């Protein structure tokens, strides 16, 4: 029986009578049942990614601090100096975790056709026609006012499952 089992396994399968003799049964694999908790975890992923990105932008460039600050009382020079620092930090952060490319790689202000976006030209969310649109049909092209952006790659760090992503920046208490 051992020799038969050995050579059967080498051949790719174990006969049912041998499997039963050794206490094994051939059962069809059933996919794991989705529990309410796993369904909630799957549904929460987009929000988690957004919270993770906001947390990174806050940590590396103080973006939330800038946006949540009331800047009405500051002079334009003060706001401009703050914007320069926040802009530089956000730009570095985005370049670190994303690779961006234009939807249409053309010169703004020149005529462009949707086909110049390649396969993306067929995606209705990739190109928005603005201005004097025809009543029927789709325009053949138009003046490129904005090249658009697409994300070619995203390399956000793995999230610790114990991390509370709703905490975008921890409170800081200085001990003296």
Image: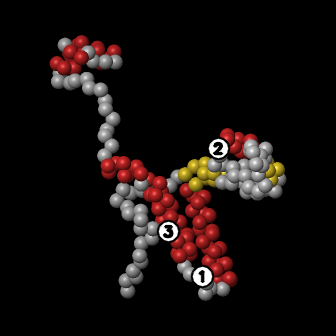
Residue at the spot of label 1: 71
Q: Earlier in the sequence, mark 1 or mark 2?
A: 1
Secondary structure beneath label 3 = helix
Is residue 107 in view?
no
The CA span between labels 2 and 3 is 35 Å
- The residue labelled by disc 3 is 59
**Of residues 33 and 54, which is closer to you in this image?**
33
How many angstroms separate mark 1 from mark 2 (CA)? 40 Å
Q: Position of residue 65 (x, y in %)?
A: 52, 75
Where is residue 64 drawn, in percent x and y?
A: 52, 72
Q: CA distance from mark 1 to mark 3?
A: 20 Å
Q: Residues within 10 Å of mark 3 (few under 14, many from 20)?
A: some
**Residue 68 location (% of width, % of height):** 53, 76
Do the CB atoms of the residues marked 2 and 3 lie less than 8 Å apart?
Answer: no
Let me know if residue 27 appears in the view.
Answer: yes
Residue occupying the point 82% across, 50% down? 111
Q: Residue at x 61, y 84 (%)?
A: 72
The mark lying in front, picked from 2 and 3, is 2
Residue 102 left/right relative to 47: right
Quarter of the figure with residue 163:
bottom left
- The numbered mark at residue 37 is none
Mark 1 vs mark 3: give the one in front. Answer: 1
Sequence-earlier tag: 1 or 3 = 3
Residue indicated by mark 2: 123
Query: Does 171 sit left or right of 120 as displayed?
Result: left
Residue at 19 percent across and 20 percent down: it is 20
């Amino acid at each position: 029986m051992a020799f038969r089992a050995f050579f059967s396994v080498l051949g790719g399968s174990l006969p049912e009578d041998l499997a039963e003799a050794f206490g094994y049964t051939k059962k069809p694999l059933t996919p794991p049942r989705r529990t309410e908790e796993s369904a909630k975890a799957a549904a929460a992923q987009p929000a988690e990614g957004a919270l993770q990105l906001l947390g990174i932008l806050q940590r590396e460039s103080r973006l939330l601090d800038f946006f949540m600050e009331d800047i009405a009382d500051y002079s334009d020079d003060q706001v401009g100096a703050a914007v320069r620092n926040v802009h530089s930090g956000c730009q570095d952060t985005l370049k670190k975790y994303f690779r961006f490319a234009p939807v249409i790689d053309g010169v703004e202000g020149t005529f462009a056709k949707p086909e110049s976006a390649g396969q993306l030209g067929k995606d209705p969310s990739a190109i928005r026609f603005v201005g004097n649109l025809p009543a029927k049909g789709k325009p053949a092209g138009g003046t490129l006012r904005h090249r658009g952006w697409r994300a070619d790659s995203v390399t956000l760090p793995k999230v610790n499952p114990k991390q509370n992503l709703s905490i975008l920046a921890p409170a800081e208490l200085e001990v003296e």
